[in-house]
Image: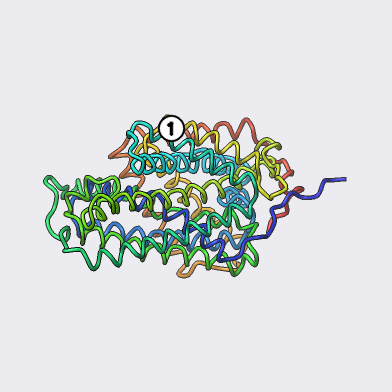
Amino acid sequence: MRPPPLTLRKTLRWGDGLALVVGIMVGSGIFRTPGIVASTIGRPALTFVAWALGGAVGLLGALVYAELATRHPHAGGKYVYARESFGRRAAFVIGWVEALGTYCAAIAAVAVVSGDYLGRLLGWPPRVASATGVLLLVAVTAVHLVGVRLGTMAQNLVTGAKVLALLGVLVVAAVAGSGAGWTGSLPGAPSGAALFGAMAVAFQAVIWTYYGYPDAAKVAEEMKDPDRSLPRVFLGAIASVTALYLLLNAAFVHVLPFERIATSTLVAGDAAEAMFGPRAGAVMSALALLVVLASLNGNLFVTPRVVFGLSRDGLGPRILSKVNSGGTPWTALLLVAVVAVLLAATGTFERLLSLAITFILVTDGFMVVVLFKLRAARPAAPFRVPLYPLLPLLFLGTYLLLLVGALIQQPGITLAALAALALVWFLSWWLVDETESAAAADHPTA
């Protein structure tokens, strides 16, 4: 007699999902990356073009993932869709690259930034940022080991607090700012053909800052009424975050000279310090720490669901599909935490960002191909992308252009990420039996 299927409890309402995704999206990026975007592009107007295009591309991706997630609302996200369209080897590659590549790099990068902001707040030297980030990562992991409800409550609390605080920044900047950064450009700002490469590199930071909306797919199995709630989470998250980011960038430019934005690693803190003095900068560092901790918490919530799903479906060690009494896939959580700790201890924010974004460009682009195959096999779905196939093709084309730009501007890190993808694909032919039916036996498809 077969054991009962391993499943995760349906405990999340659409508001929980929205708080989770917004908490992941509004993380280290909006504090760290405006300076990277400004210094790379060199012109205030073009930075706003980059941020607006980031929201538009995010909307395209959210539409694609809303359809995929409602077609197959199971734990795991991308790898589930790859399995249903191209088989178990494709699922193995997508799942493990995403879990231990994309998201462990992202968790590590957020942990490094968390340590940076905590150190800035306490007056510690920058060299201890990685070690401090590792300690914060371990502490958040301990919260999630207790159970799903505690992790969800923590996410709702910090997400609400940080959104209110960021809205306060907007109001104060609008009143106290003088429009210092709206004019001028940096010396040597790229133009002509060089501008394409600069935009591609800057867009990596923009995509990083917007990314997080696909994470609703990872908790689809735990959502109540997923057919209705998942599209609301995807589209609500990207719409609200796009508006927030555009307003925040306008606030930064309204307060700081553009040259200062381009050299800043904590733009919001520098803006507050310019308006109210050093004490306000410390307050903003505390806000930044709250923001990135919410992102760290959210990423540590969703990523183990991918490892759990892979292992439950026979694409990973069975021990990684264990769930504790609190509803947490605890063995998968520990694996994710260990890998992220190793990356955080050895990598810089910029290097981790570039690595994660290369994986994202490839795996998310592949999801468009997956959607085409699923649509061809079964046109009906609870949610369907409008203007199909135009919008998915536009999303795919954008990601291909960005990958080409990354290869031109950052060949080393981009080729290293592509080599890692190729290695996992090679391993899939050795480790995965395409004919194995364990997934179907354990967990029926939607």
Residue 355 vertical placement versus 444 (above, below): above
* Residue located at (37% from left, 44% from top): 117
Q: Is residue 421 left or right of residue 285?
A: right
The answer to whether residue 427 shows anywhere in this view is yes
Q: How is the image coloured?
A: rainbow
Residue 372 showing in the rendered view: no
SS of the residue at dot 1?
A: helix
Q: Which residue is mark 1?
A: 131
Residue 429 drawn at (x, y percent): 60, 33
Q: Nearer the viewer, residue 282 or 56?
A: 282
Indicate whether 124 appears above or below 389: above
Which of the 4 image quadrants contains residue 223? bottom right
Quarter of the figure with the N terminus:
top right
Is residue 340 shown above or below 236? above
Instruction: Please name the amino acid that badge 1 sits on.
Output: Ala
The x, y position of residue 141, in whole percent, is: 56, 42
Quadrant position of the C terminus in the picture: bottom right
Residue extending farthest front = 279
Residue 319, horizontal then vertical, whole percent: 70, 36
Tally of numbered discs:
1
Badge 1 density bin: few <14, some 14–19, many ≥20, Cα 10 Å: some
Relative side of 115 to 177, left or right: right
Q: Going 50% across and 63% down the picture, which residue do you hit?
A: 234
Q: Residue at x 35, y 53 (%)?
A: 30
Residue in the foreground of this view, choosing between 304 and 429: 304
Left or right: 40, with 234 as reference point: left
Q: Is 88 left or right of 278, judged from the image as shown?
A: right
Is 100 or 300 nearer to us in this picture?
300
Query: In the rendering, at what x and y percent does residue 357 appear?
Result: 40, 44
Where, by quadrant of the figure, is residue 9 drawn?
A: bottom right
